[in-house]
Structure formats: structure tokens, C-alpha cells
Amino acid sequence: ASTERRITSTTPLQALYLMNDPFVHAQAKALAARVQNDADTDAARVRRAYELLFARTPTADEAEAATAYVEKLRAKLSAPAAWE
């Protein structure tokens, strides 16, 4: 049935299933590889990811937030692990 609004029904179990599903992991890896191969800079990769995922370019705020996230994640991953 058609409805103007739908109530969000995602449960924690659904989210956990998707986070742990091998198919979802494989698709994420394929997207990452494609974006990595298609563009040379973080800004260009963010733009390409938005084009592939949302069929549009990111807004200035979205591009800035995504690029900042990538930089923060890269720094975190390159730092020595706290347990080592």
C-alpha cells in the first residue's frame, strides 16, 4: 500500500546482521576498490563515491565532512595501536 510516510523499523538485529554479512562486506570492498581506482585524491574519491551511491555530487558540507572523516580515519589507522 502506498503511504506518505513510513515508520522506521530497523532493529538492532537487522543492523548487526548487515554489519556482519559477508555479502555486504564484499560489496563494500568492491565499492572501495572502484572509488580508489577511479580517482587520485580524497576529494575526488568522495565525489566519485557520491556519484556511484547517490547519483549526484556531494554538497560542499557533505564533501568537507567526508574528506575530514577520511583524513581522521587515515591518521587513526596509521597510529600505533594502543595495545602494542
Image: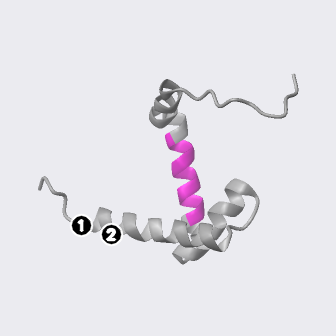
Q: Which numbered circle lies on residue 75?
A: 2
Q: Is residue 27 left or right of residue 72?
A: right
Q: Would residue 39 be seen by someone viewing this image from the given angle?
A: no
Judge from the rendering whether residue 82 lies leftward or rightward of residue 9; answer left or right.
left
Q: Is residue 34 magenta?
A: yes
Image quarter of residue 47: bottom right
Residue span colored magenta = 25-35
- Front-most of residues 51 and 6: 6
- Decide if residue 37 is in sight here: yes
Residue drawn at x 85%, y 29% is 3
The answer to the question of whether label 1 and label 2 lie on touching residues, with beta carbons closer than 8 A, is yes
Residue drawn at 54 percent across, 77 percent down: 41
5 to 30, vertically: above or below: above
Q: CA distance from mark 1 to mark 2?
A: 6 Å
Q: Nearer the viewer, residue 44 or 33?
A: 44
Residue 78 x, y percent position in the rendering: 28, 67
Q: Which residue is mark 1?
A: 79
Tell me where residue 63 sits by quadrant: bottom right
- Front one among 28 and 1: 1
Q: Is residue 84 above or below residue 14?
A: below
**Location of the N terminus (image quadrant):** top right
Residue 40: which quarter of the image? bottom right
Bin the neighbour count of mark 1 within 10 Å (Cα to Cα): few under 14, some 14-19, many 20 and up.
few
List x then y, in percent, for residue 80: 19, 64
Q: Is residue 67 magenta?
A: no
The residue shown at (66%, 62%) is 50
Amino acid of disc 2: Ala
